[in-house]
Amino acid sequence: MSAQREMKEKNPWHTPVTIIITVIGVIAIVALVTVAVVQNRPLPQKYKYGIVLDAGSSHTALYIYEWPAEKDNNTGRVEQKHSCKVDGPGISSYASAPLKAGQSLRECMQKAEKWVPSKRHHETPLYLGATAGMRLLNMVDSVASEDVFQAVKEALQKFPFSYQGARILSGQEEGAFGWVTVNYLDERLKQGLETTGALDLGGASTQISFVSDNYDGSESPNNSVNFRLYGNDYNLYTHSFLCYGKDQAHRLKLAHQTQSGPNAVADPCSHPGYNATKKYSVLYDSPCVSDRKPQGAPATFHHTGTGNLQQCQEVVRNVFNFTDCKYSHCSFNGVFQPILQGGFGAFSAYYFVMDFLNLTDTTVPLEAVKEQLKAYCATPWDQIVQQHPKAKLKYLAEYCFSGTYILSLLTEGYNFTSVTYSDIKFIEKIKGSDAGWTLGYMLNLTNMIPAEAPDFPPLPHAGYVSIVTIIAVLIFILFLFSLRPLWPRCSKQQQIV
């Protein structure tokens, strides 16, 4: 028994000091590992959301955007996450029944309510921007326009989002934000690259926007917009032509053809064999043509097609005014336009029409494009209907005109040549986001939304380094103390020597 007690006393690992040092050492190691893991764990990314309703002349679409709560060069990195096309026509069509304008938005709004995380509902801004359709309605009947907006407001305020209002965008805003969208999605703004021009074609208006080295805004200040994005300044030329969207341009064309109030119109922009009876009152109920309605015209006229591209081009040319220009350069209708520069993205109706006609490949020579369109327009109407059984007849009847109008607008209106035509790229989406003004609008608005404080590690960097250093030194000292039982042996060995 005395022998066991003697061995235990001689074993240094059984001393109280050693046990204490071991416990403290284990605690220090655990603390060091814990601090390192907690400090360096991945931080959860916060996201914000925004909803924009594009109330166009022919339809309304809802877009949901998402971006990190922290900002990049004071501009949120916005991405489209969801879209919803509202059933029915544009809200301007509900002038006589405003409540239906608000009701039409309900289904898409309910989908948005499910898509955006519920904890973000109250802080998600909701905007409605109306374009040329509501511009025209406001010109004709401002009271009806206000009633439509009131109905829309009441409908949207029933949802748990942060409603920010509904308003009519100016044509200049529509064009400028479309330009921002195209260049943002191509990451040209972030990288400071040469920008791309934007060509937007809707039902009631069309916009052209681009940066030109030869334009400083002095010759036509009303067409100048300045942006600061990602630390860079941009002086943008932009102009919107109201009544020159494809639907209203079609009315302008028919108005020219019915100036004398005929009973029948043989239209080279419609397919051979096409025939329909149309009302003068319906044709001329738009402010774009209402002042041109011929006196003493019959109630209806018989609209037939002949399908001749060359003659169609001549008719389309009449909707433009190329004679008046008080500036150094003009597009049409006496509007200033600097010399075209760089590439262009053409979207909205540009894309949908040219895609239907299989003419989106701009590497194909312009003359070859015209030949293909010529053959399409000359195709009999019955054959066209058979080839596209699912297409709505109203749209199907206008593709010949729309294709001809687009080529005339680009080449004669905006001055693209057979050489520069290849600088145009017809686009629907860029990196999953729809091309259009809504993303640019949302991107611009993120500069006015305060950024949330980002998540930081629990400890500041200096504090983290200090704590790790102290624990490391402590562990080292404890390690030295753990070797204490060996110290006498080392000293005795030295004495023997």
Image (cartoon, rainbow, N blue to C red):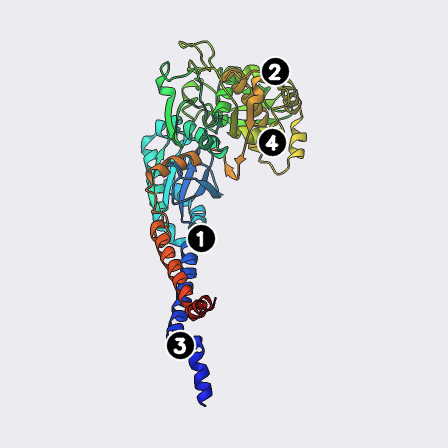
In primary-sequence order, the first of circles 2 and 3 is: 3
Q: CA distance from mark 2 to mark 1?
A: 65 Å
Q: Is residue 447 visible?
A: yes
The residue tagged 3 is 15
The residue tagged 4 is 356
* The N terminus - image quarter: bottom left
Q: Would you identify the image quadrant in which residue 189 lies?
A: top left
Q: Is residue 11 above or below residue 354?
A: below
- Nearer the observer, disc 2 or disc 3? 3
- Nearer the observer, disc 4 or disc 3? 3
For label 4, the SS is helix
Question: Residue 275's x, y, as percent?
Answer: 60, 26
In primary-sequence order, the first of circles 4 and 3 is: 3
Which label belongs to residue 42? 1
For label 1, the SS is loop
In primary-sequence order, the first of circles 4 and 2 is: 2
Q: CA distance from mark 2 to mark 3?
A: 107 Å
Q: CA distance from mark 4 to mark 2?
A: 21 Å
The residue tagged 2 is 310
Q: How many labels, in total?
A: 4
Q: What amino acid is found at the position of numbered circle 2 in the picture?
A: Gln
Question: Residue 2's x, y, as percent?
Answer: 44, 89
The foreground one among 151 and 302 is 151
In primary-sequence order, the first of circles 4 and 1 is: 1
